[in-house]
Image (spheres, coloured by chain):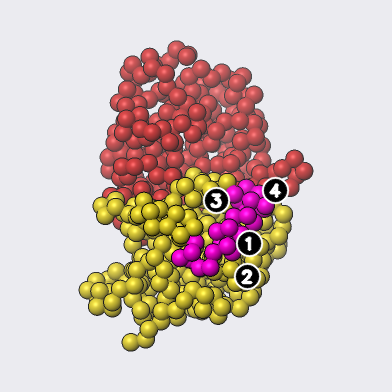
């Protein structure tokens, strides 16, 4: 593993890419904020944030669940396990309408089949070898989150096909054609970070194009380029993504996902 | 007081081929499997199905070849995998699909429920869903501007399904319904429809409803019929009543990978059973139902 500045001794342990991703994602939520999350790594990230630096943040699930505290690992948003110990049960109109569409959601996490150089996300369909679309799950709340959250964090595995120059189907807009959100007529701020198993990307440049914010330990610029389907903006000195602290790792492994249902998924 | 309790067979018989049926489940939660199965037994044809986050019930009906159009926000069987029958039908073009988002479906039902003809939304702007429908399905969505501020919006046409079918935990014979746990778009979907059918786990006396009327999400006067069917959502989970049946969902997720597998599944579990009681026996009977029965504290 590459030498890196870590906040404590976690580097001496084997840390998985999923654990680095979850920790990086958790740092995107600040105390007191409201987040709309899906199942999987985003949920782990928010629980981690609540248990560490952001105890006053709120989590909203699109199905209509607020601040749940499940004790058993759920298989999805539709699993009663994730309704446990919530402080509010409602529905889409409340979660995605009266909160998200209203403009009070600070950060939204979305997963992606594909994410392109302007942060546009596809969860609907990929292109088969014959050029025909092969359908997948679709938007659900993803487009709503991408439209209206003040900041969007995209979670996606790194790979040439996962990060193409242009998505095969634009389900959830980022900075489409490099345009500003205002030009696109979209109320939310759009993607601020794309967190992959190799790097953290951002769009804070005049072209609103993916730029490397940090690389995970052991990843090189060459490896990143090889695994990305578009030209990344790569600054001269790319910092290394901070590793989880010992306490963050302990929480993730022992309390938040002890069966590694989601942590294992991205490894 | 009107007694609206009917058999699911009678209810389904009353729905003409070609109807627009809104379904109340979400992925693997609170699906009206009892209704979907009966639709398949009676081979209702050319249905339009709508749903915020589609799940098993839609996959079953599409997999049985009985849907001509779906209006949906997306969906899957959660960790049991994609809704493969639906995806296959979209891939091969055998079903017309209006792909929207969870909130836009909710808004379209809300507009229908309010009796207004359209509703503005910011979702779908600058998305491919919008691009596609601007060309091909402008009967559902169009671009518009706010007459006061000039802001850009997507205008969604209101949805008023011919029938909405919502599975609930508790209803009385009049149709007053309690829904436990989160409700996704159940309320606005139910109230947008021209006819509302409830399938209920438990039938209670009205006096029980009267003790906590604040829990009534759907008032009886909106309801045409109540079907009483314990484990009517199996194998999906019904919060507070029972957990999803992981064994059966795995079996289904494996079977529906191919059209042949899906046909064999339907032949055995749906067409091969006379009614929902027969289906419940087939999938494990009382012992299985006791296994998945919800524990009082957890609700699953």
- Residue at horizontal 60%, vertical 21%? A223
The chain that hosts pointer 4 is A
Whole-number angstrom distance, CA of label 3 to CA of label 2: 20 Å
The residue beneath circle 3 is B252
Whole-number angstrom distance, CA of label 3 to CA of label 1: 13 Å
Q: Nearer the viewer, residue B41 or B239?
A: B41
Evaluate if marks 3 and 2 touch, with contact meaning CB atoms under 8 Å apart: no
Evaluate if marks 2 and 1 touch, with contact meaning CB atoms under 8 Å apart: yes
**Residue at mark 2 shares a chain with residue at mark 1:** yes
Q: Nearer the viewer, residue B281 or A154?
A: B281
The chain that hosts pointer 2 is B
Q: Which mark is residue B64?
A: 1
**Closer to the observer: label 1 or label 4?**
1
Q: Residues within 10 Å of mark 1 (few under 14, many from 20)?
A: many
Q: Residue furthest top?
A: A3
Mark 3, secondary structure of its residue: helix
Q: Which chain is yellow?
A: B
The chain that hosts pointer 1 is B
Evaluate if marks 4 and 3 touch, with contact meaning CB atoms under 8 Å apart: no
Q: Which chain is red?
A: A
**Magenta region: which residues?**
B255-279
Whole-number angstrom distance, CA of label 2 to CA of label 4: 29 Å
Q: Main secondary structure of the magenta part?
A: helix
**Residue at mark 4 shares a chain with residue at mark 3:** no
Is residue A54 in view? no
Q: Residues within 10 Å of mark 4 (few under 14, many from 20)?
A: some
Q: Which mark is residue A133?
A: 4
**Residue at mark 1 shares a chain with residue at mark 4:** no
The residue beneath circle 2 is B43
**Closer to the observer: label 4 or label 3?**
3
**Closer to the observer: label 2 or label 4?**
2
Q: Residue furthest bottom?
A: B1
């Amino acid at each position: 593993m590459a030498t890196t500045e870590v906040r404590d001794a976690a580097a001496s342990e084997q840390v998985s890419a999923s654990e680095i991703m979850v920790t990086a994602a958790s740092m995107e939520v600040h105390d007191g904020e409201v987040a709309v999350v899906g199942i999987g790594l985003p949920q782990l990230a928010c629980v981690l944030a609540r248990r560490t630096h952001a105890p006053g943040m709120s989590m909203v699930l699109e199905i209509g669940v607020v601040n749940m505290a499940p004790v058993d690992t759920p298989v999805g948003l539709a699993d009663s396990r994730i309704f446990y110990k919530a402080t509010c049960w409602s529905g889409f109109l409340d979660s995605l309408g009266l909160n998200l569409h209203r403009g009070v959601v600070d950060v939204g996490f979305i997963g992606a089949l594909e994410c392109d150089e302007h942060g546009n996300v596809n969860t609907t369909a990929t292109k088969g070898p014959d050029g025909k679309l092969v359908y997948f799950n679709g938007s659900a709340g993803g487009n709503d989150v991408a439209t209206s959250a003040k900041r969007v964090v995209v979670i996606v595995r790194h790979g040439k096909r996962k990060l193409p120059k242009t998505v095969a189907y634009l389900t959830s807009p980022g900075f489409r054609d490099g345009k500003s959100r205002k030009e696109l007529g979209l109320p939310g701020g759009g993607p601020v970070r794309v967190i992959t198993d190799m790097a953290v990307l951002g769009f804070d440049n005049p072209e609103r194009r993916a730029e490397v914010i940090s690389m995970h330990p052991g990843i090189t610029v060459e490896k990143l380029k090889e695994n990305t389907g578009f030209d990344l903006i790569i600054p001269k000195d790319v910092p290394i993504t901070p590793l989880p602290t010992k306490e963050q790792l302990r929480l993730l492994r022992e309390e938040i996902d002890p069966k590694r249902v989601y942590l294992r998924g991205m490894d | 007081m009107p007694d609206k309790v009917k058999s699911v067979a009678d209810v389904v018989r009353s729905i003409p081929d070609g109807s627009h049926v809104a379904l109340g489940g979400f992925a693997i939660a609170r699906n009206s499997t009892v209704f979907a199965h009966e639709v398949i037994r009676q081979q209702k044809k050319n249905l339009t199905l709508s749903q915020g986050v589609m799940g098993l019930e839609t996959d079953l009906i599409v997999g049985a070849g009985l849907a001509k159009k779906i209006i949906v926000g997306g969906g899957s069987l959660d960790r049991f995998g994609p809704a493969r029958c639906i995806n296959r039908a979209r891939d091969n073009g055998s079903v017309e699909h209006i792909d929207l988002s969870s909130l836009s479906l909710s808004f379209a039902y809300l507009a229908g429920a309010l009796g207004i003809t359209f509703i503005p939304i910011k979702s779908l702007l600058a998305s491919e869903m919008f691009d596609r429908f601007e060309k091909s399905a402008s009967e559902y969505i169009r671009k518009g501007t706010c007459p006061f501020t000039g802001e850009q919006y997507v205008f969604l046409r209101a949805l008023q399904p011919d029938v909405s079918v919502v599975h609930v935990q508790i209803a009385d014979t009049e149709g007053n319904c309690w829904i436990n746990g989160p409700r996704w778009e159940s309320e606005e979907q139910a109230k947008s429809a021209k006819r509302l059918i409830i399938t209920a786990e438990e039938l209670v006396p009205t006096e029980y409803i009267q003790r906590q009327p604040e829990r009534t999400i759907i008032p009886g006067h909106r309801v045409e019929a109540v079907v009483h069917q314990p484990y009517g959502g199996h194998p999906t989970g019904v919060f507070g009543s029972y957990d999803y049946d992981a064994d059966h969902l795995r079996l289904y997720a494996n079977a529906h990978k191919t059209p042949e597998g899906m046909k064999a599944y339907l032949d055995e579990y749906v067409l091969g059973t006379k009614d929902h009681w027969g289906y419940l026996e087939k999938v494990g009977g009382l012992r299985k139902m006791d296994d998945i029965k919800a524990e009082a504290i957890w609700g699953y």
